[in-house]
Every structure is written in structure tokens, then in C-alpha cells.
Image (cartoon, helix red, strand yellow):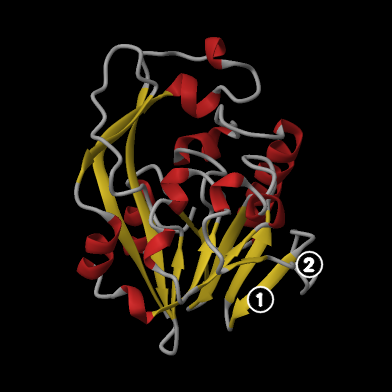
């Protein structure tokens, strides 16, 4: 099993107010504290399949110009998604499945480049306006029952699981890859930065705060009981953890 980052933006930042303010409110946190930010998604090569987890921003997305009001700056654009995927060693026609953690544009932006892949998405997000342009979307069934302390999961391939984790959106899911005795948790936006995971804080973007809290609690419980590499989307710690096989 090979997991690689698809690197899209670098050298960004997010304020603690954004990273931690989901429950108590942004005003409860220090706007002078910044954490490193970036944008990357991931590709899983099983040896027989090439499976993507999310597909980045739309190619047309303009460069951000941050100012004193910017709470999250993804950073400077490195390249577009398809070019970044090529740099990781893969072409669109090789992709068999795409696991969409949730419907937001920084996770679905280039789905249009994979018309022959099966796109698997949580049912509520699959029904959203954001996903309507893609006829190859299949609703996740979570038909394989519990995955450890997560009540609902779907086995995608040997060692790859798509797990219901509602809150950030109503159809939010996470991906866990089992390999070499480790659990690689590609979590979308359960947190925006790993520091929020350590501090047990929700970020400010969610559709169901109670469900988001339950999902974060389950993530932290899982990590406490299994050697987990926390593979994030919005911080370079995501690919740094992955490349170092660093357990939380």
C-alpha cells in the first residue's frame, strides 16, 4: 500500500480563532496565534487500484491575497490538482475510485476530470447541489457495520475503510487505511490543524455542531487506542506525519 500527498498550496496560516472557535466562539481565542496551513489531498495505491481521497480546489480558484481580516490563508498555489497528481506519479485514467470526505470545493474541485471513476460520498452530501454535476457519484452505504468505535463504515478495498463522521457537513466521512501495523486516518476537516486535535477543539465551519463534537470525540478515542498517523488536509503536518509515519 502506498499513500502519497497531492500538494496544492503551501506557506499559509490560520488563526487560532478559526482553528479552535467552533464551540465557544471565535472571540474566546487569541487572534495573534497562528498555525501553519496548506492544502493537500491524498492518493492511495493498493497495487491493483488507484484511489483518491478528495480532489482539491477548482483550477480556476484565484490566488488568495490575505489581509488583517483573513482567518485562514491556504497559502500560495503550487499547481493545479491534475498536475499535482501527475507529479505524484498518476494520471486521471488510472483512477478507479474517489472517496469524497465532504462536499466543500477544496475537496471536490476537480472531480470533473475523472468521469470514469466511481465517486463515493456520504448520502447527504451526495444529494447536495455541489455534487449534482457528477453522474458517477455513488452514495456511501456504510453497510459493513461498526469499525472499532465508529458505528458505521464501508469497506472500500482490503485495508481501506470509509467511515461516517458527521458534523463538519451532514454527509461528512473519514478514510482509514490499515498498513504495516499503523492506521492512517485521512480525515478531511475533522480539524483544520493538528493543534486543534491535541487541544480537543472544533473549528468554526460545520453543519451540525453536536455531531461534529461526537465525531471528534470518536476520533480522539480511536487514536488513544490505536497507533494512528493523523493525515490532515489543511496543515503541512498532514504530509509530514505521513512521510515520517509519525503516530499521534
Residue 224 position in % (x across, y down)? 63, 53
Q: Nearer the viewer, residue 154 or 197?
A: 154
Q: Which residue is mark 2?
A: 146
Residue 23 position in % (x across, y down)? 65, 23
Q: Which residue is mark 1?
A: 155
Q: Residue furthest bottom?
A: 48
Please tell me which residue is depicted at 66% across the width and 76% down the height of the picture. Answer: 155
Determine the secondary structure under disc 1.
strand
User: Dot 2, crowdedness within 10 Å: few (<14), some or many (≥20)?
Assistant: some
Q: Nearer the viewer, residue 197 or 161?
A: 161
Please tell me which residue is depicted at 43% across the width and 60% down the height of the picture. Answer: 111
Determine the secondary structure under disc 2.
loop
Q: Is residue 146 left or right of residue 236?
A: right
Residue 218 position in % (x across, y down)? 70, 49
- The tally of labels here is 2
- Between the C-alphas of marks 1 and 2, the distance is 11 Å
94 over 200 or under it: above or below:
below
Q: Is residue 228 visible?
A: no
Amino acid at each position: 500500500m502506498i499513500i502519497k500527498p497531492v500538494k496544492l498550496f503551501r506557506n499559509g496560516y490560520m488563526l487560532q480563532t478559526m482553528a479552535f472557535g467552533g464551540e465557544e466562539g471565535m472571540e474566546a481565542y487569541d487572534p495573534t496565534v497562528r498555525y501553519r496551513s496548506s492544502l493537500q489531498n491524498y492518493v492511495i495505491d493498493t497495487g491493483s487500484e488507484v484511489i483518491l481521497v478528495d480532489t482539491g480546489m477548482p483550477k480556476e480558484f484565484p490566488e488568495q491575497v490575505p489581509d488583517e481580516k483573513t482567518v485562514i490563508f491556504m497559502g500560495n498555489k503550487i499547481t493545479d490538482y491534475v498536475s499535482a497528481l501527475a507529479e505524484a506519479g498518476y494520471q486521471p485514467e488510472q483512477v478507479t475510485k474517489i472517496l469524497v470526505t465532504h462536499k466543500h470545493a477544496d475537496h471536490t474541485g476537480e472531480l470533473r476530470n475523472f468521469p470514469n471513476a466511481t465517486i463515493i460520498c456520504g448520502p447527504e452530501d451526495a444529494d447536495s447541489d455541489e455534487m449534482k454535476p457528477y453522474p458517477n457519484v455513488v452514495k456511501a452505504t456504510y453497510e459493513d457495520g461498526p469499525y472499532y468505535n465508529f458505528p458505521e463504515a464501508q469497506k472500500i478495498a482490503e485495508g481501506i475503510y470509509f467511515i461516517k463522521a458527521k458534523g463538519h457537513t451532514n454527509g461528512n466521512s473519514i478514510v482509514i487505511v490499515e498498513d504495516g501495523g499503523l492506521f492512517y486516518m485521512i480525515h478531511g476537516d475533522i480539524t483544520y490543524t493538528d493543534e486543534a486535535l491535541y487541544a480537543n477543539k472544533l473549528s468554526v465551519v460545520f453543519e451540525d455542531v453536536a455531531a461534529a463534537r461526537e465525531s471528534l470525540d470518536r476520533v480522539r478515542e480511536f487514536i488513544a487506542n490505536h497507533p494512528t498517523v493523523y493525515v490532515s488536509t489543511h496543515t503541512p503536518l498532514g504530509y509530514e506525519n505521513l512521510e515520517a509515519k509519525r503516530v499521534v
